[in-house]
Amino acid sequence: MKDAFEPYDSEGDALEEMKVLRIGDIPIDKHIAKYKMLVTKAKLKDDNPVVIDLFRETLSMSLQRQLLTLEKP
């Protein structure tokens, strides 16, 4: 039943959503949860360098700068 009603390319759809996702005004924990859900839906491993880079792109520039200045980013 699930296969019959699941979108044709749900993995691709999740990947596209990961590319355009931005943090906006939601709390960081909800943003991370949504991103992790999309990673699972796209059937990717969360330690994949592309997944990590896409996540960084979802963050604001000021938050990216703060993370890069940490001793262990």
Image (cartoon, rainbow, N blue to C red):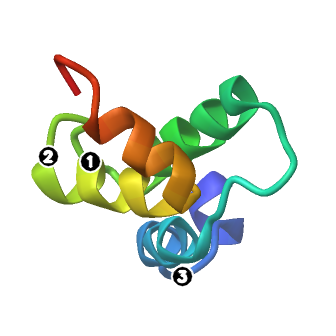
Q: Residue furthest right?
A: 25
Give the residue at mark 2.
48
Q: Nearer the viewer, residue 26 or 7?
A: 26
Give the residue at mark 1.
52
Q: Nearer the viewer, residue 13 or 27?
A: 27
Q: Is residue 63 above or below residue 42?
A: above
| The C terminus sits in image quarter | top left
Residue 57: image x %, image y %? Answer: 43, 63
User: Which of the two discs, 1 and 2, sits closer to the camera?
Assistant: 1
User: Which of the two discs, 3 and 2, sits closer to the camera?
Assistant: 2
Q: Residue at x 27, y 24 (%)?
A: 70
Answer yes or no: do the residues labelled 1 and 2 have beta carbons within 8 Å? yes
For the residues marked 3 and 2, what is the alpha-carbon distance in whole angstroms?
24 Å
State the SS at label 2.
loop
Give the residue at mark 3.
8
For the residues marked 1 and 2, what is the alpha-carbon distance in whole angstroms?
6 Å
Q: Residue at x 48, y 79 (%)?
A: 9
Residue 50: image x %, image y %? Answer: 19, 60
For the residues marked 3 and 1, what is the alpha-carbon distance in whole angstroms?
26 Å
Q: Quadrant of residue 22?
A: bottom right
Q: Residue at x 65, y 41 (%)?
A: 34
Q: Is residue 1 left or right of residue 67?
A: right
Res 59 visible: no
